[in-house]
Structure formats: C-alpha cells, structure tokens
Image (tube, grey):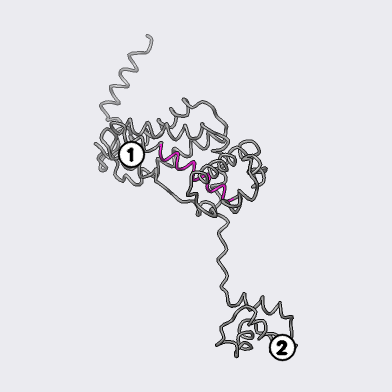
Amino acid sequence: MPMNEVIRSAARHILLPASTSTNVMTLWQACFHIEPDAAPSEPFVATQLRDCRMPRQPTPSPLKPRRAPSQPRSERMVATLLEAAAQVLETKGLEGFNTNAVAERAGVSIGSLYQYFPSKDALTIALMQRESERFYRDALIALDQPGGPIALTHLIGVSVRQQFARPTLARLLDVEESRPQLRVALASTGSVRSVLLEILMRDGLPPQDDVAVAASDLMAIVRGLVDAAGEREESDTTGLTRRVTAAVFGYLTMMSSEGRNDDSPAEDTPQPASKREQAVRKAGARGLKRP
C-alpha cells in the first residue's frame, strides 16, 4: 500500500477529525520527521499517530504516594503497610528493606502495595512523616505545661523518648533522612522549632539576645546528643535526659542577656590581683611556714 494510503487509513482508524484527513501526511512528517518514501506498517503508523495526538500523562513521582487514603479501609491498609515497613527495617535493616519484604510482612500482594506506594523510597518518606507527626503531637503538649522551665524539660523528654521508643527504627530513619533527595521530598506538617521558640519566650528561662539563633543552636545540641546516643545504642534514658537537660539549660544560662554588661569583663573571668592583695597573700604564706 502506498505511504499516503497507509497514513490516511491509520488516521481514520484512530478517528482523526475529518478536517485534518486531507493533511495527514503533514501531520505525520511534523510529528516524526519521516521521509515520505518510508513505508511502515499500518498498525505502526496508527500507534505512532495516536501517541502524537494524545499528550502523555506525567509520570508519577516515585517519592510520593500514588493516592491518599480517603476511606477507613484504605486508611487501615496504609497504616498496615507503614507498620510493616517499620518492622522490616527493624528486623532486616536497610539491606533487607524492599517492597516485596514489606508486602509479605503486611500480608498483602505486591500489587496492593503499589496501589499506594510506587517505590521503596515512597514508603520510607511516608514512614518518616508518620514518625515526625507523632513527635510533633507529643511536642505540642509542652505548650500546655506551666512556665518555661517545665515546658522545656518536657520537650527534652519527648526528644529522648522518641529515640528510645524504637531505637533501631529511629537510627535507620536518621540514616535515610541524610539522603538529599529524601530530605527535600519530606513534607513538614508542623515545626518543633516553632514550639521551642514559643517556650523560650516564656517566663522563668534566661532571656536571650536572639531567640531564633538560640532555638537553632538548642535543636542542634539536642539532636546531636540524642543521635549520638542512638548510634552508641545506649539504653539509659534517665542518664541521657540529664545530659541533654544540662547542655540545654547550661547554654541558656551562659548566653543569657540578663544582667550582662558587654562593656565589662564577665564575672567568671579571673582578674589580676592588686599589689596590696599580692602583699597580703605573701605575708600569709610566710606565716604558714614552720619556724
């Protein structure tokens, strides 16, 4: 069949508008830059023209869930899959963490899993978000505590308990969160930093020159101590809580603007003794010598 006839027949097959049927050759060449003397088969032409006319749907991101659960049943399915993902991480580590293992642990088919999560990374991000949301809900309770010191102590306790509730899971999720592509894809539902900022402005805590800087420093201090304890697989929550509390309140005390005169030396800085004081000290030392 001549080339023109093949294209016209293919165009009719995919229901091109009648007004374009006389210019099918132009459409073909514009789409695919095929020479007129090339003669592919009619089914091939039909497929290619269909792809040219119909815009391709954007490929879903492998880091985002395919669909959000809207019914109780689908919500339970997502919760089951996320808990299965957490258990696989805890028992098999990052090396054994994959969608097949998660589906098997959840007791569902791999097809059911892929209805919600297109990849292992999408599962990981959803699990990180679940843990972050739980941490944020617990952190918000600190705002119900009376006074700054009690609220800050509660927030420190929440940070430590999150690490020790499921230490293996927390440690592995910290490792995964260090991957730039996952960190960017994480959606923040609430800011623990905003909770800390509100606490630092309460009465009872040493005032700071720059509360925003203090909040950032304190978050780095808490996270550094807690993560380091997790890497060492510590189990003494009371001891870690005391260390973190000492570091946080020590920072606030040392950096406090209350009663500090920047033009004068700090009280803790030793000052050189006067000549009179030196003479008194020497006389006292001589009096202590044996005759």
Question: How many numbered tags mark residues here?
Answer: 2
Q: Is residue 76 visible?
A: yes
Where residue 205 sits, quadrant-wise, is: top left
Q: Nearer the viewer, residue 156 or 216?
A: 156
76 left or right of 104? Answer: left
Q: Nearer the viewer, residue 215 or 26?
A: 26
Overall secondary structure of the magenta stretch? helix
Q: Nearer the viewer, residue 102 or 43?
A: 43
Mark 1 or 2: in front is 2
147 in magenta: no
Quadrant occupied by the C terminus: top left
- Dot 1: what SS? loop
In percent of width and height, residue 81 lies at 57, 43
285 left or right of 4? Answer: left
**Amino acid type shown at disc 2:** Met
Residue found at the very far top of the displayed protein? 291
In percent of width and height, residue 199 lies at 32, 38
As measured in the structure, the alpha-carbon distance from the residue carrying label 1 to the one carrying label 2 is 82 Å
At x 32%, y 14%, the residue is 287
Name the N-terminal-most of marks 1 and 2.
2
Where residue 169 sits, quadrant-wise, is: top right
Q: Which residue is mark 1?
A: 255
Residues drawn in magenta: 121-137
**Amino acid type shown at disc 1:** Met
Q: Which residue is mark 2?
A: 3
In percent of width and height, residue 59 lies at 57, 63
